[in-house]
Amino acid sequence: MPHRTLLPPGWAPPIGYANGIAADASRIVFIAGQVGWDARQRFVRTDFVSQFDQALANVLDVLAQAGGRPEHVCRITAYCCDKPAYLAARAALGEVWRKRMGKHYPAMSMIFVADLLDHPAVIELEATAVVPSAA
């Protein structure tokens, strides 16, 4: 296992993320913000859940180029333009997450912003992963 989840004694476990991750540095992979467009930079779908699904798939596609897998992700920062849409879609987003990431929950932050550069993006995900040298 390339990392371990950090949970201070007495803290309630977080739901859907980790408070911290300790990783043995082998190969650190920094993944730039990925939005919900396809490989040709086209937005095929504009709904929140579809864009989240595509953005997460894009993160994992970039990670795979470094030999990484979902369980190697240690941190994700999400930038979101629509807080009500995010809150309304939490159950569906959980399904997307489990489909792509299984039960792996890295350290995460959700930041609500006024807009994103690539229109009509509503969510952008950036990540940091630690890929073991044997991977």
Image: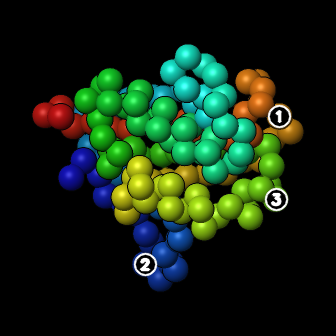
Is disc 1 surrounded by few (<14), some (14 to 19) or many (20+) residues within 10 Å? some
Q: Dividing the picture into quarters, in which one does residue 89 lie?
A: bottom right
- The amino acid type, in three-letter code, at marker 2 is Pro
Mark 2 or mark 1, whichever is nearer to me: 1
Residue closer to the observer: 127 or 59: 59
Give the mark nearer the N terminus: 2 vs 1: 2
Quadrant occupied by the C terminus:
top left
Residue 132, placed above or below residue 7: above
Most extreme residue toward the right is 114
Residue 27 percent location from the top left of the image: 28, 30
Residue position for label 1: 115
Residue position for label 3: 84
Whether residue 25 is visible here, answered yes or no, is no
Most extreme residue toward the top is 40
Residue 64 percent location from the top left of the image: 32, 30
Residue position for label 2: 9
The local secondary structure at tag 1 comes to loop
Whole-number angstrom distance, CA of label 3 to CA of label 2: 33 Å
| Residue at point 82%, 59% (across, down) | 84
The local secondary structure at tag 3 comes to helix
